[in-house]
């Protein structure tokens, strides 16, 4: 005998990306649990941002009756002087019968104690509590939450629970929430719980409450509205599949809307515009119709709201404010990173200032080891700055990966030169020397490199590279103030060059408008 089974776990809004990463594992886990409890049947798993749903059209009301066989210890070990041994007594307890009711059987060519019994299948409703707890525990979303006074965790707080076998509610509790016969529809319809008469009426009740339960149905609606907008506005909407999947996961009733922004923002690099739209706001970029291979971006964007057309103008206006703020931020960082002629002049002028700061005596002895060493440090600094500019251009690059990669590549490149120029005996260092090398050379350098690239990410490579020129200036000032070193007029000129170079690199163009109002 079978009955329809509905399991609905109501939650606060689920984050799209963690959910999409494990959707297949969620289904696979329930399949495995069904097999473990001998209840394997076809089922459907669907989701919205506020619910995880399992539906069985024909769920067995109980497990199949089964014949269970028990094989015990060899008979020679089960009896001693005609009396049962502890091994035999333990086997009889396992079987739940007196020793005298145990039989004999053969296993691996030996006579052993044997018992067989008919085990009646358990009722499905008595197993669902344990099955659901295992299913919940199998969901590995990554970052989890605790709420209230509870110590258990889930991706988001559970707010309602519905476990139904046909018309009956099954007594189940998860995270302190007991199963009920109510669900929640879209908030634009009502905030109150809605009664579900039976399993078969569940989806129609959600549909009447403006909730599209099926992810494929929500996706089809989004794509159909994209088609309509493209026809109306004579545009092409960039249909990023992964972004569409995210939008499907965060909406229960999707509605595509068209927003605009100031054409002045199109001066930003296209990658910056698209990243600001897609990754930060989940907007879809718009390009020209029949634009060929190098189609241009248009000053429009598509936002998919979770609701109907009510208050559409207000929703569009709010999203336009948001995207303008995003583009203004992007413009700030683009200008911070832009290597303009003025900044190139500032960098070269700062470099000249450092050379002058080294001193005329050193410059007159060009070719000397000291000056070559100082020049090598400066060249290395400029190479580091160039490296920073390159790595900044790679989207979503991890600071730790960059720092680690820089250290590993640098070590591999320097190792042959070290072995060639240094005495091999230096490699046979004491334990304390090796520990000091590890602490100073690896940990300190690694930490400094990580901090360096972190600052690059936050402040921009151009700013950081020019700030390197302050280091010799600080060293010069400290030498004069604290060590009594003599300062030549040319060195003060070098300081002027450095400060002027820094000033040139920090000059930015006019900011783009934050708002059209």
Image (cartoon, grey):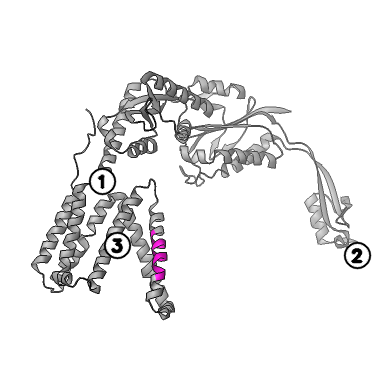
In the rendered image, residue 188 lying in the magenta stretch gets the answer no
Q: Disc 3 to disc 1, how far (Cα)?
A: 21 Å
Q: Alpha carbon of mark 2 to alpha carbon of mark 3: how far?
A: 89 Å
Check residue 150 in the rendering and tell me which mark sits there, or answer none. Answer: none
Residue 264 place in picture, x, y as percent: 25, 32
Relative vertical location of residue 102 with respect to residue 147 in this rendering, above or below: below
Of residues 473 and 297, the one nearer the viewer is: 297
Which numbered mark, 1 or 2, is in the foreground of this view? 1
Which of disc 2 and disc 1 is earlier in sequence? 2
Residue under label 2 = 81
Circle 2 packing at 10 Å, graded few (<14), some (14-19), many (20+), is: few
Q: Are marks 1 and 2 in contact (CB under 8 Å)?
A: no
User: Which label was assigned to residue 338?
Assistant: 1
What is the magenta range? 406-416
Residue 485 screen position, x and y as percent: 13, 73
Q: Which residue is mark 3?
A: 380
- Spatial distance from mark 1 to mark 2, Cα to Cα? 95 Å
> Residue lying furthest left in this view?
489
């Amino acid at each position: 005998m079978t009955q329809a089974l509905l399991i609905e776990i109501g939650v606060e809004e689920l984050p799209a990306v963690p959910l999409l990463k494990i959707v297949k594992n969620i289904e696979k886990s329930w399949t495995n649990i069904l097999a473990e409890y001998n209840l394997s049947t076809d089922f459907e798993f669907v989701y919205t941002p506020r619910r995880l749903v399992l539906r069985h059209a024909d769920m067995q009301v109980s497990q199949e009756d089964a014949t269970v066989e028990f094989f015990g210890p060899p008979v020679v070990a089960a009896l001693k002087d005609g009396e049962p041994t502890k091994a035999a007594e333990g086997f009889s307890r396992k079987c739940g019968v007196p020793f005298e009711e145990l039989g004999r059987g053969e296993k691996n060519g030996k006579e052993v104690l044997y018992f067989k019994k008919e085990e009646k299948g358990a009722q499905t409703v008595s197993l669902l509590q344990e099955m659901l707890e295992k299913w919940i525990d199998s969901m590995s979303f990554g970052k989890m939450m605790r709420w209230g006074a509870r110590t258990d965790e889930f991706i988001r707080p559970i707010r309602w629970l519905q476990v139904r076998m046909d018309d009956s509610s099954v007594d189940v509790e998860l995270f302190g929430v007991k199963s009920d016969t109510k669900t929640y529809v879209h908030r634009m319809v009502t905030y109150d719980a809605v009664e579900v008469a039976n399993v078969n009426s569940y989806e129609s009740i959600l549909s009447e409450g403006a909730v599209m339960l099926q992810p494929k149905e929500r996706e089809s609606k989004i794509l159909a509205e994209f088609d309509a907008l493209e026809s109306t506005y004579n545009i092409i909407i960039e249909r990023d599949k992964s972004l569409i999947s995210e939008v499907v996961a965060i909406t229960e009733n999707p509605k595509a809307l068209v927003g605009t922004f100031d054409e002045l923002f199109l001066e930003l690099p296209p990658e910056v515009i698209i990243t600001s739209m897609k990754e930060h706001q989940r907007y879809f970029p718009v390009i020209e119709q029949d634009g060929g291979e190098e189609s241009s971006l248009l000053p429009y964007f598509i936002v998919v709201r979770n609701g109907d057309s009510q208050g559409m103008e207000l929703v569009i206006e709010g999203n336009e404010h948001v995207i303008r703020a995003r583009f203004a931020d992007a413009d700030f960082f683009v200008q911070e990173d832009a290597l303009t002629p003025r900044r190139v002049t500032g960098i070269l002028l700062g470099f000249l200032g450092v050379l002058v700061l080294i001193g005329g005596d050193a410059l007159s002895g060009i070719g000397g080891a000291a000056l070559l060493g100082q020049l090598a440090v400066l060249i290395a600094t400029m190479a580091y700055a160039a490296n920073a500019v390159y790595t900044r251009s790679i989207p979503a690059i991890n600071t730790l990966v960059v720092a680690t990669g820089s250290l590993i590549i640098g070590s591999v490149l320097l190792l042959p030169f070290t072995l060639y120029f240094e005495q091999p005996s230096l490699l046979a260092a004491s334990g304390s020397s090796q520990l000091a090398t590890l602490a100073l050379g690896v940990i300190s350098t690694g930490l400094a490199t990580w901090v360096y690239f972190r600052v690059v990410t936050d402040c921009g490579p151009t700013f950081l590279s020019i700030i390197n020129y302050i280091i010799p200036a600080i060293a010069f000032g400290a030498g004069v103030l604290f060590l009594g070193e003599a300062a030549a007029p040319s060195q003060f000129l070098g300081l002027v060059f450095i400060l002027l170079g820094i000033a040139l690199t920090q000059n930015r163009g006019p900011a783009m408008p934050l708002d059209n109002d």
